[in-house]
Image (cartoon, grey):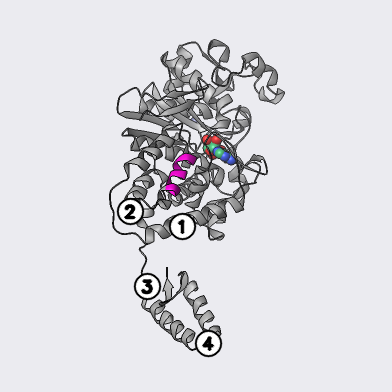
Amino acid sequence: MALKLYNTKSRTVEEFIPLNEKTVSMYACGPTVYDYTHIGHIRKYVGDDILRRTLTLLGYDVKHVMNITDVGHLTDDADTGDDKFEKSALKEGKDVWDIAAFYTDYFHDTMRAVNALPPTIEARATDHIAEMIALIETLVAEGVAYETPHAIYFDVTKDPHYGELSGQKLSDKETAARDDVVIDPDKKNPADFSLWFKRVGKFADHVMHWPSPWGDGFPGWHIECSAMAMHFLGETIDIHTGGIDHVPVHHENEIAQSECATHKQFVRYWVHHEFLLVDGVKMSKSLQNFYTIDDITARHIDPLATRLMFMQTSYRKPINFTWDSLEVANQQYKKLQKFAAHHEEVGEVNEGYKNIFIEGLSDDINTAKALATVWELLADAAVSEADKWATLLHFDTVLGLNLKDVEKFSISDEAMELMKKRDSARQEKDFAQSDELRRQLEGLGYEVLDTAEGTKLQ
Ligand code: AMP
Ligand code: ZN
């Protein structure tokens, strides 16, 4: 079945046709590792994960590259403000390298907890400075980048296509640019962005720095993604993902840098994930309105429940986060776990449900439709239990809920003993004792049912 994907560039849902028949190159903008990974990030990376797993289910071999931004990201995406790592290092009394290492680990732990598959290649920006410098040299040679005493800038007026991704005219961007964006008096246009910062002026003491043809310094944030995407995936890639906030600046700049260097199309399909909000505003590190995986586990919610919560809504629509909605998703997850715990025999995948599931995902990754198929399957009395289990396992290659690893249901010796005692108590009409034993069984994780044959556990 042909996959249809919304392409931000064309603003339409298009049929997905990769450059090479069976392989898909996919580049995902990664985290800036100066603070905790939060549930907003989880939405984005689970979104990438579901897209990738869907492509795999459809028979593609996916090469998924993701960067780790560990240098060069200033507090304002448009190159003003402070360096995020230096600010965080100062606050925490650590050095910038420790900050990056600590929060990279936290990101990895979070991704493991939500079962997002590791990218085929994960690339740290600081490991690819040479590729960035080479790309900047090409842009200078092409006459689209220029040097000032402070930095090397990309001249946006040299790219006739600049602004096409977001549909912004350069004149709008310039009038919208705040005064403080123009920190360098030698910068030609307010929307020009930095490819390389020199270790001078406010960055004279910048801790992370490398030699370059323009002296010691460090790369701007945008150049890393162009350099690493093209290094690992070639000059034209199939899919590039990011959060919706990346459209007007970061991705606009990535296209400009890449296409002015290669004179080829950089990305065929631009996929952007909508935000996770809190009380109507973006969950973000800067607003400090975020929750992490530790907040989730502290409430005894399984981190995998986040996947179910996100899948109820299209990746192109905002979600307002509430603990109630995550609790509901957790209850749903428990139902699926219970089903998994009670099923061992694996029958045949039901073709009818399989097709509906794939149809949903192929419709611009309509996860809500795919999820609805799961509940319909489980409620269908016409499908055997073994076939339901086989089909659910098949679906789980995309859902990523780890259902095959759920421990199978069994009654422990301790529970068996309590059950016997409870049946005797009930025969003797000692209901207080019977209730107490019910509580003990429930404490062991069992659901207690009273049947004509006595106590039953589930
Ligand atoms: P950052 O570490 O801030 O650079 O963000 C990494 C990725 O997560 C980017 O693609 C962001 O757009 C995305 N992201 C950050 N916050 C949220 C949020 N609240 N909801 C969805 N995606 C987000
Ligand atoms: Zn990026």
Q: Report the residue at 56% width, 60% height from top.
A: 298
Residue in front for this viewpoint, 382 or 301: 382
Where does label 3 land, which residue?
A: 411
Q: What element does badge 4 sit on?
A: loop
Where does label 1 land, which residue?
A: 335
Q: Position of residue 362 (x, y in %)?
A: 41, 32
How far apart are labels 3 and 2 at the CA level?
24 Å
The segment highlighted magenta reads 368-376
Q: 398 above or below 18?
A: below
Q: Report the residue at 48% width, 84% height from top.
A: 426
How far apart are labels 1 and 2 at the CA level?
18 Å
Give the mark nearer the N terminus: 2 vs 4.
Answer: 2
Residue in front for this viewpoint, 416 or 61: 416
Q: 255 above or below 357?
A: above
How far apart are labels 1 and 4 at the CA level?
32 Å
Amino acid type at mark 3 = Ile
Amino acid type at mark 1 = Lys
- Which numbered tag is attached to residue 430? 4
Where does label 2 land, which residue?
A: 384
Give the mark nearer the N terminus: 3 vs 1.
Answer: 1
Labelled pair 4, 3 in contact (Cβ < 8 Å): no
Mark 1: is the Cβ under 8 angstroms from ligand 1? no
Say whether residue 139 is left or right of residue 75: left
Q: Whereabouts is ligand 1, in terms of quadrant?
A: top right
Give the mark nearer the N terminus: 3 vs 2.
Answer: 2
Please name which of the two marks, 3 or 2, marks the residue nearer to the observer. Answer: 2
Labelled pair 1, 2 in contact (Cβ < 8 Å): no
Residue 370, magenta (yes or no): yes
How far apart are labels 4 and 3 at the CA level?
24 Å
Q: Report the residue at 56% width, 33% height from top.
A: 73
Residue in front for this viewpoint, 392 or 150: 392
Amino acid type at mark 4 = Asp
